[in-house]
Image: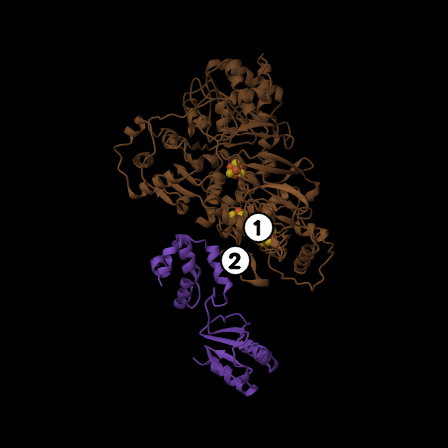
Amino acid sequence: MEKTVKLTIDGKEVQSPEGMNLMDAAELAGIHIPNLCYLKGMKGIGACRLCLIEIEGLKAPMIACNTKVREGMVVNTKTEKVQEIRKFIIDLILSMHPLDCMTCTKAGICNLQKYAYEFDLKESSFTRKKFGYPVDEANPFIKRDPDYCILCGRCVRVCKEQGTNVLEFMGRGIGSKIVTANDKPLQESECTFCGSCVDSCPVNALLEADRWRKGREWEYERINSVCLLCGNGCEITVSTKDGRVQKISSGAPAGSAEKYICAYGRFGFDCIEAETRLTSPMKKIDGELRGTTWEDALKIVADELKKAGKDAGFISAAGILNEDALTLKKLARDVVKTRNFDTTVSLYADSDSLKKSQRADIDRSDLIFLLGLNPSQWERVLPALDAAVRRRINRGAKLVVINSSETRIADVATVSLKGDEISNIKGIIKVAIEKGLKADKKLESSVKDIESTEEIEKASALFIEAKQPIIFSSPALFEAASNLSLLKGKKVIAIPLESNARGVVLMGLTTEGKTYREMLTDKMKALYVVGEVPLNKRPDTDFLIVQNSHLTGLAREADVVLPSATFLESAGTITDFMGRMKYLPEVIEPQGESKSHRDIFILLAKIMGSTIKRPTEAEVKKASNIKVKLSPVPFVKKEGLDISPQEMIESINASVINGSRLLWLKETEKTIAV
Amino acid sequence: MKVEEIDVDEQIGEVGQILSEAEKKKGILIHVLQKIQEDNGYLPGDVLSNLSKKLYFPLSEIYSVASFYKQFHFKPRGKKIVKICMGTACYVRGAKEILNTVEERFNVKAGETTEDLAVTLETVGCIGCCGLAPVATVNDEVKGEISSKKLDRLIKFIKEE
Ligand code: SF4
Ligand code: SF4
Ligand code: SF4
Ligand code: FES
């Protein structure tokens, strides 16, 4: 249990966890202390002085963002004195601000606007100053307009904490400006266009580039959902207006930097209305795809599936929802009566490692292991993991990277072990046992022949010392990772490449016949492909059905194409890599005639003379509810799971990239790389 | 100074014993920047890039630190560095006129360098010899009491090789 302290804020008795700052403690009690530079989740830096409060017994006001609660403290947040100081600060800031609220994109969520209103300041009482800085709008993602900047430094700190280090203060005093290294445009810096800085900016200095006259903030409906574009499954907040997505931000509440999303998650939504978006079913006539009705398309598919029977094959991406996966399995096994149903998970993970992964809170860990993983914000491979790890390191945790290939994240590791991963893990275990950690006899004897090195000793020492170590592992190395975790009974987690990999496995969508790869080569009588899979060429099959939201390279070679809803257009759940169930509402309606995967399966079953009931939440929960216990296992690196994560993630998102402004990023990177 | 060969422990000296690796790198930064500027006359972008890689220190932060101090320059500097004093005493005795004339003659604005890298023109606060106002310095050599006659001489002096 966390210790709590009692204090009084504005006459109210408040209980707060020990060590918390006054800003958060007041917020817990429903008291808002004005602030401009504070970001929940990060240490207060005291730059804006707006959060000054008075503490009884102390002469001078103190800053709430960086003063910790103490037992018996009596705090007043709205005394005449501090209100006057606050008004003065806002007055000063307004003297250098465009005062442009009538057309400003951030109006409604701008903190400066909010406080000007609160402190009754129609304009500044000082002489106005205009800087006339140039605007950086050379990229389609983020517009930087320094004339609006109030130099709160929030953007600098988020960008730094997540390890991208793009933005910084340049110069000093009133002439300071937030710039990239050597004041280059964003695309010539290390910027990944994650947009964390946009979410953190309290004013209009950083904003999404396409927002001009796309609706005022108060007209938006905000809906929480989950990004399904990679294995991280990040929480997002989608703002919609008139049934269209207007912007996507990280799922954290405003004024908090606790959650990260990458450029895919934030800007990929353009693809919903891309030219390649499928809005009606299609069938091939004389070698060409033509539009047709659902009735016709489903009839053809039903006939082909009936004909194929047990020689039909189903392959699916693992970015589909749990409910879709359950329905798909029923369609394949109970209606079509085939045992061949598998997902892309089999390209990079085994079911066991996904099922056995545990739940842990990275924000509490003091030591992180990355085993066989190469997350990178710049290459957009599990970028949220990369950001979370870097942030944790910046807050004092240590990192051990174990990878036989080069990784960029090793730059910030305390210890980086190159060479064979299994030997390195064995080495760490061996040293740890020698230094007194208890282990199972079998485990002890399986590591005894390993020679340890100075670096292995260092890693082992860190492991022994750590209170809350977390081991993140590639699925292929999960066994070795779990053996290590057993020494301390601490957390071990396999990281998949797709958002609902664990979910589809739990829902039982793992083959009982041919595997994913076998179905591509074994000439199936009918092959039914669901979602975006890393496949560009038609595999050898008599009949190809592609069910996807976009006309992919593969879909162009299909016999029938069925248009499905994107993840923002369909409701359901996923089970992320830590086993957390996450809910996705239908944020907007499906485009055109597209339908959710499960609706298509249900219709198809009906035409084939069977009824599949819509899966209920209870059914999903039941399928998810499995008990696993870790025990010592042989050290093996599993074969056949070595698809390149970067290629995999890029190809399952090909429609998203090609159908959105992300394409610009890819092309710009190419030209810069040349 | 070869950036690639920087030895952090040697640069930081004894105090390094009580500092973390990250603190040591931060600690030597200004010193290293001064050396780079001594060698090159300014802080070249590619050298700073290498420094960032060598120290695993964000490039943005290096620029940020350097830009805080007036002593660091990010562009090549002229052979003659001309500083015109704009302190109160010099100002009232016609510093502005001197500045305007020099700007005109060399076709350069205060804070800039001529294209041929001959002259860098700057203004300064006070150089501490108000008795000689108005004052200018050329490569740290003080020229005082600049009357209009002396102004021509000053310009000639700047032009000299
Ligand atoms: S978009 Fe992301 S990487 Fe780029 S400056 Fe903003 S926070 Fe930094
Ligand atoms: S750009 Fe925005 S977040 Fe960054 S310092 Fe300026 S006002 Fe603050
Ligand atoms: S890291 Fe993955 S899940 Fe998170 S926003 Fe990016 S693509 Fe989406
Ligand atoms: S919020 Fe405390 S000083 Fe800005």
Return the x and y of residue A259 as percentages of the image width and height. 55, 41
Res A74 seen here: yes
Pointer 1 or 2: first along the chain: 1
The count of marks equals 2
**Quarter occupied by residue B133:** bottom right
Res A137 seen here: no
Given residues A548 and A599, the one toward you in this image is A599
Given residues A296 and A519, the one toward you in this image is A519
Quick one: label 1, few (<14), some, or many (20+) residues within 10 Å? some
Ligand 1 within 8 angstroms of badge 2 C-beta: no
Q: Identity of the amino acid at label 1?
A: Thr
Query: Chain B rendered in what hue?
Result: purple
Task: Tell me the number on the disc at residue A564.
Answer: none
- Label 2, secondary structure: give it: helix
Return the x and y of residue A230 as percentages of the image width and height. 50, 35
Q: Is residue A125 above or below residue A660?
A: below
Query: Chain A rendered in what hue?
Result: brown
Return the x and y of residue A41 as percentages of the image width and height. 55, 44
Disc 2: host chain: A
Given residues A24 and A242, the one toward you in this image is A24
Q: CA distance from mark 1 to mark 2?
A: 35 Å
Q: Identity of the amino acid at label 2?
A: Asp
Identify the residue position indicated by label 2 in the image: A183
Return the x and y of residue A53 as percentages of the image width and height. 64, 52
Given residues A58 and A650, the one toward you in this image is A58
Protein image colouring: by chain
- Label 1, secondary structure: give it: loop
Q: Is residue A436 above or below residue A618?
A: below
Identify the residue position indicated by label 1 in the image: A67
Q: Is residue B120 above or below residue A565?
A: below
